[in-house]
Amino acid sequence: MQRGLPMQPTVVLLREGTDTSQGNPQLLSNISACLAIAQTLSSTLGPRGMDKLIVNERGEAQITNDGATILKLLDIVHPAARTLVDIARAQDAEIGDGTTSVVLLAAQLLKEIRGYIEEGVSPHIIMKGFRQATKLAIERIKELQVTVDKSDPEAFRSLLLKCASTSMSSKLIHSEKPFFSKMVVEAIECLDPEDLDESLIGVKKVAGGGLQDSLLVQGVAFKKTFTYAGAEQQPKHFNDPLILCLNVELELKAEKDNAEVRVEAVSDYQAIVDAEWEIIYRKLQAIEKTGAKVVLSKLPIGDLATQWFADRDIFCAGRVAAGDLRRVVQATGGAVQSTCSDISREHLGTCSVFEERQIGGDRYNILEGCPKAKTCTLILRGGAEQFIEEVERSLHDALMVVKRAIKNGEVVAGGGAIEMELSAHIRKHALTIPGKLQLIIAAFAKALEIIPRQICDNAGLDSTDILNKLRMKHATDGKWFGVDVDGPTGIRDNMEAFVWEPSLVKVNAISSASEAACLILSVDETIRNPQSQQQGPGPKAPPGTAQRALRGRGRGMGRR
């Protein structure tokens, strides 16, 4: 009699309840998740893009159409879709603009090759095609980009204004483009041209007033800090004052907070109090000897010191924010001192005018005409708080774009023009390649058309008709033709219409989108730990822990 084969034991590798999904269904599910995100963002693209109102769990509302901000607020949990959030954040940090474009491009690349995945084409062939097409696109941008001559300051400034206004055309403040473009370019020009550190541009938000009431301070402005009684007697306006920045507390300490002293006579106690007063007076006299007329400290300045300074016509402000104090030092010269002794002239800064000014409902301390002005402050006005926050985000994008344009100086035409030209170039090149790669590269070329198509859809134009016109123009040497949301024909030469963008924005967006698409295609299995699906705070305690902890509590031990 033939013996049966031995039973194979079941091998349990993963904990019970672990979710594993693999193969093509998993890949298609990841692609669907990315498309869902792109669908949310698509309506925000372009000069006629809509805004999103996002309410968080605390009931705070934010209105924005900045791609990176929307993705940050959405709190996405799908592991593959988070890749798109990461590329949007990277684009925002590196370039500042093009965050919506990069997500739409990545999702459209995945959408175009979805059919090939279903038909069984290997993801590796698709990834190879994408990498080739990305290389082609970047080389073509390098050929096409227009370099602006930096030796002519007027022409270069005009380029920066155009880049700033193109960045703002899709934002809430597009109606005030000329006003804010000029402000943004002037703000960047205040910075050190070597490093262009945009963190030295302070932004202060003051509710009330109109957008046109916003102003640029060529120096530092910060909100009036908490002050004691004597502050109103201090002068609020100086010409050419010496400015001392401190990291010193000028305040009497309450004894109970700091020390315990045992004394036997009242005179001993009085000696201790006198010594403490002597210490603070010594500090104040040392500050007065420096000749400084404006004293700013990161730490509190108490009522005694405030009144003492007021009697000697010195202005003081304590609890100044660290960022503001850093910008004061950068603008006025000098250095932050952590002691009041041995302060010499080189440790002090100066400016031509210091004044306290009322702006809206707040008072601001403003330092203008700083000798080392490598910093400036934007004071934004507007009705609602959410509106001013969106203005700040819009200006951040414009500042970053202008910064990139100064560093690189190469521009391309926006409004979908460069995408259509790249699409035509890559499609033509695809016909010279045999095999499956031809299909993949052609799909990449078609995916690039999502940008002009979405701009048309958001503006209520007939995207099919306009894209056909653009394809015809790009086939006959109209390389800078893009979408015109205002004109009767729907297309125009965007280079002549001054819709300019730094070429770096496009290079970064295309390479990031392609990398993200390749990353999602390379994942064929997701293993999800059952714990990661629970909202619990942490691992469970072993069984019996609670009983052991409670044993013997609340009851007396039995008598023996």
Image (cartoon, helix red, strand yellow):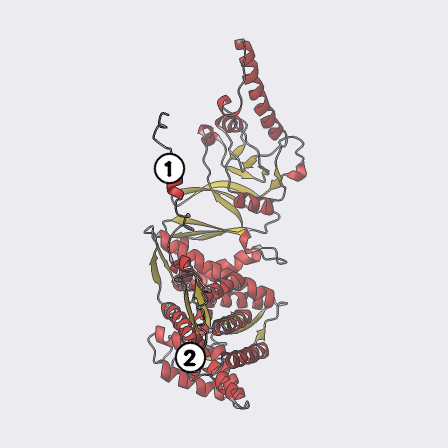
Choose between 346 and 470: the one closer to the eye: 470
Q: Nearer the viewer, residue 377 or 426?
A: 426
Q: Residues within 10 Å of mark 2 (few under 14, many from 20)?
A: some
Vertical arrangement, residue 481 with respect to residue 374, above or below: below
Residue 548 place in picture, x, y as percent:
40, 40
28, 446: nearer the viewer: 28
Q: Is residue 544 above or below residue 416?
A: above
Residue 493 visible to the viewer = no
- Secondary structure of the residue carrying tag 1 is helix
Q: Which mark is residue 277?
A: none
Q: Residue at 56% across / 51% down in the picture?
A: 375
Dot 1 amino acid type: Leu
Q: Could you tell me residue 288's position as x and y percent? A: 60, 29
Residue that label 1 marks? 550
- Amino acid tagged 2: Arg
Q: Which residue is mark 2?
A: 114
Residue 448 image point, x, y percent: 46, 78
Q: Residues within 10 Å of mark 1 (few under 14, many from 20)?
A: few
Q: Earlier in the sequence, mark 1 or mark 2?
A: 2
